[in-house]
Image (cartoon, rainbow, N blue to C red):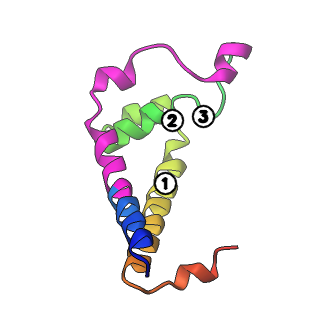
Amino acid sequence: MPREMSSNHKINVTLILLAPIIFYLIPEENILSGESICLHKIILKEECWGCGITRALYLILHNDFHTAISYNYLVILVFPLLVAIWFHMLIKEISILNGNNQFSKLKR
């Protein structure tokens, strides 16, 4: 594997590992307060299915399940899906780094 490609995958693994840690470390007041940035809510003045999901995901990471579900009950589905996607991305990048490029067959 070319050195440049290997370093790109190392950066990818690092970013994949850091993303949830950084999200976890964001101060609560930055996540739970402030105006909504949802375009649907701003333009149509009504909440969409995704409204509150960022706050709900943040609260799930901080073990506040009841409040998370009150922000958006779809967090029950979204959180496990995001965890599965996160693990898939991590395993894919690590396997490429280790020379087991089985995921390249899936790329089209």
Q: Residue 72 versus residue 20: which sits nearer the camera? A: 20
- Secondary-structure class at tag 3: loop
Side of 98 where 36 appears, left or right: right
The answer to whether mark 2 and mark 3 are in CB contact below 8 A is yes
At label 3, which amino acid type do we have?
Answer: Gly
At label 1, which amino acid type do we have?
Answer: Leu
34 part of magenta stretch:
yes
Label at residue 101: none
At label 2, which amino acid type do we have?
Answer: Ile
Task: Give the residue drawn at x 55%, y 79%.
Answer: 103
Question: Where is mark 1, residue-wise?
Answer: 82
Label at residue 53: 2
Question: Where is mark 3, residue-wise?
Answer: 50
- Secondary-structure class at tag 1: helix
Q: Earlier in the sequence, mark 1 or mark 3?
A: 3
Count of marks, rendered view:
3
Crowding at mark 2 (Cα within 10 Å: few <14, some 14-19, many 20+): some
Magenta region, main secondary structure? helix
Q: Residue 12 in the image: x percent, y percent?
A: 41, 60
As measured in the structure, the alpha-carbon distance from the residue carrying label 1 to the one carrying label 3 is: 14 Å
Q: Is residue 96 above or below residue 90?
A: below
